[in-house]
Image: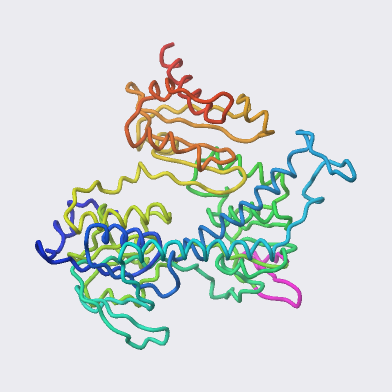
């Protein structure tokens, strides 16, 4: 990601002066697009949002909201199946619950998934309409640096919109292998899983990044046999190594088969399932296969060349830290920029773009303040500098880890996996990074995100009251131990 002071324009396009409303046109209705539209409308701009696949984009309709809704069901099953030590027994047989004694109605689960996604999309539409945003159904494409044309599904032109400011927030689509085309029935990408009405007997997941790990964890909890094909030695490459180790241990305990250092070459349907062929020549037979191979930005037919917008070799739009592209007045946000594939980052990029374009003072996106979570069981959440950064010498830091095995609330809830990791600057003890591995780690990371963003010290974190008993107690306890260690 470029620095705002280099290469890209130093100031936004001049928008109309007092008395005239700036014309803002946004292409894409995902988090980057709709948050930008709300921001622009609240600033008094005449705002148009063009979207062809539904408001909320992939994040709401086919990705984040659906997957986390599915995972919510999986979490409940996982908790009950893992709770015999809490004294829970079957009312009829007196047997302890296990994964084999529980069942899930996948058709009902997926109906709920799609209903919630549709409801969230409707809420977004209502918010945009109330804010005065003009909503246009169609595909937006640049027609020069200050005009966006609208096309229908067949590519016919429906109209055009002149713009003082343009934001491109078109998102990304699932990457597929030519040798394993997804059919929506047996060979699936992550947008197609919610059409299943029966639980896969054996789901092969190709790809051990965030998407692959999340679905492998979820479908195993739901009751499917799961094989995860990973091209790396460990799952979740690029994630905290200790966190990946915990997840691999959880996979082993729950019965997920991980085929490390293996790469899928092809996938083909059989009469009653699929066969995935590895580059080694070995074949894995299952009922379904999920191709979780990352995303490709929707930028190929966006008309970027007509305006001179620069793109990287990957197809991602080049932006700086305030979301500017190489063309003055044209901004971009979300997965099409390749900054971080996170809905929260897309939304922040969109808001930053509008604040900057419309003349507000704005803070640029700071990557070390971005928190993210992986919704496996247990969850993994991170923020700021990583331990790998410290070990490689990229950052100076002290690292302290505290397992949840000493936490009283964890004991009460039967939590046996997880830890808290705190990274501080030597001397000042300013918090610069953290990792939380625990149930609901996505919620627990917020105090550390605040600490990183506001440069709090370990002493300040340690001196903050926490509820007893609570998992947050470990967040303060690890800081307290760091303070004590530094005094010895």
Query: Quick check: is 280 in the magenta stretch?
Result: yes
Percent of width and height locating residue 37: 31, 62
Say if 308 sits above or below 474 in the image: below
Colouring of the image: rainbow
Quadrant assignment for the C terminus = top left
Percent of width and height locating residue 87: 79, 34
Percent of width and height locating residue 407: 60, 26
**181 on left or right of 17:** right
**345 on left or right of 211:** left
The residue lying furthest to the front in this view is 130
The one nearer the camera, 235 or 278, is 235
- The answer to whether residue 284 is visible is yes
Quadrant assignment for the N terminus = bottom left
Say if 334 sits above or below 306 in the image: above
- The answer to whether residue 62 is visible is no
Quarter where residue 244 is shown = top right
The residue lying furthest to the top in this view is 488
Q: Residue at x 36, y 75 (%)?
A: 300
Quarter where residue 140 is shown = bottom left
Q: Residue at x 41, y 87 (%)?
A: 154
The residue lying furthest to the right in this view is 93
Q: Residue at x 45, y 16 (%)?
A: 485
Query: Quick check: is 458 in the magenta stretch?
Result: no
The one nearer the camera, 344 or 337, is 344
Which range is magenta? Answer: 268-286
Q: Residue at x 76, y 74 (%)?
A: 272
Percent of width and height locating residue 100: 81, 51
Say if 60 sits above or below 161 in the image: above
The one nearer the camera, 379 or 101, is 101
Number of marks present in the image shown: 0
């Amino acid at each position: 990601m470029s620095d705002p002071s280099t290469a890209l324009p130093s100031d936004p396009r001049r928008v109309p002066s007092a008395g005239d409303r700036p014309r803002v046109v946004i292409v894409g209705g995902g988090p980057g697009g709709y948050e930008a539209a709300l921001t622009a409308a609240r600033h008094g701009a005449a705002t148009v949002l063009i979207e062809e696949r539904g408001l909320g984009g992939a994040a709401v309709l086919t990705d984040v909201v659906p997957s986390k809704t599915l995972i919510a069901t999986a979490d409940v099953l996982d908790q009950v199946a893992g709770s015999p030590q809490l004294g829970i027994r079957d009312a009829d047989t007196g047997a302890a619950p296990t994964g084999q004694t529980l069942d899930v109605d996948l058709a009902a689960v997926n109906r709920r998934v799609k209903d919630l996604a549709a409801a969230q999309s409707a809420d977004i539409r209502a918010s945009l309409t109330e804010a005065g945003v003009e909503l246009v159904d169609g595909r937006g494409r640049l027609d020069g640096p200050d005009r966006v044309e609208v096309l229908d599904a067949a590519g016919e032109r429906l109209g055009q919109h002149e713009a003082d400011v343009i934001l491109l927030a078109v998102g990304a689509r699932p990457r597929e292998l030519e040798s394993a085309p997804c059919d929506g029935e047996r060979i699936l990408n992550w947008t197609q899983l919610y059409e299943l009405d029966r639980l896969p007997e054996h789901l092969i997941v190709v790809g051990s990044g965030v998407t692959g790990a999340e679905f492998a964890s979820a479908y195993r909890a739901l009751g499917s046999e799961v094989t995860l094909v990973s091209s790396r030695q460990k799952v979740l490459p690029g994630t905290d190594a200790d966190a990946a180790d915990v997840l691999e241990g959880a996979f082993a305990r729950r019965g997920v088969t991980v085929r490390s250092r293996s790469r899928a070459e092809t996938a083909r349907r059989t009469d009653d399932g699929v066969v995935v062929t590895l580059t080694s020549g070995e074949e894995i037979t299952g009922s379904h296969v999920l191709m979780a191979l990352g995303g490709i930005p929707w930028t190929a037919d966006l008309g970027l060349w007509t305006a001179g917008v620069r793109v990287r070799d990957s197809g991602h739009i080049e932006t700086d830290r305030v979301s500017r592209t190489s063309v003055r007045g044209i901004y971009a946000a979300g997965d099409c920029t390749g900054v971080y594939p996170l809905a929260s980052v897309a939304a922040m990029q969109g808001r930053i773009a509008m604040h900057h374009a419309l003349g507000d003072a704005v803070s640029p996106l700071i990557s070390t303040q971005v928190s993210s979570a992986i919704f496996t069981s247990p969850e993994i959440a991170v923020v700021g500098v990583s331990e790998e950064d410290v070990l490689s010498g990229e950052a100076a830091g002290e690292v302290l880890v505290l397992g949840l095995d000493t936490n009283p609330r964890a004991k009460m809830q039967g939590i046996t996996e997880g830890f808290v990791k705190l990274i501080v600057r030597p001397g000042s003890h300013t918090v610069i990074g953290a990792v939380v591995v625990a149930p609901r780690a996505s919620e627990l990371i917020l105090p550390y995100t605040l600490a990183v963003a506001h440069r709090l010290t370990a002493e300040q974190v340690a001196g903050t009251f926490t509820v007893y008993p609570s998992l947050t107690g470990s967040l303060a306890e690890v800081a307290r131990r760091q303070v004590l260690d530094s005094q010895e």
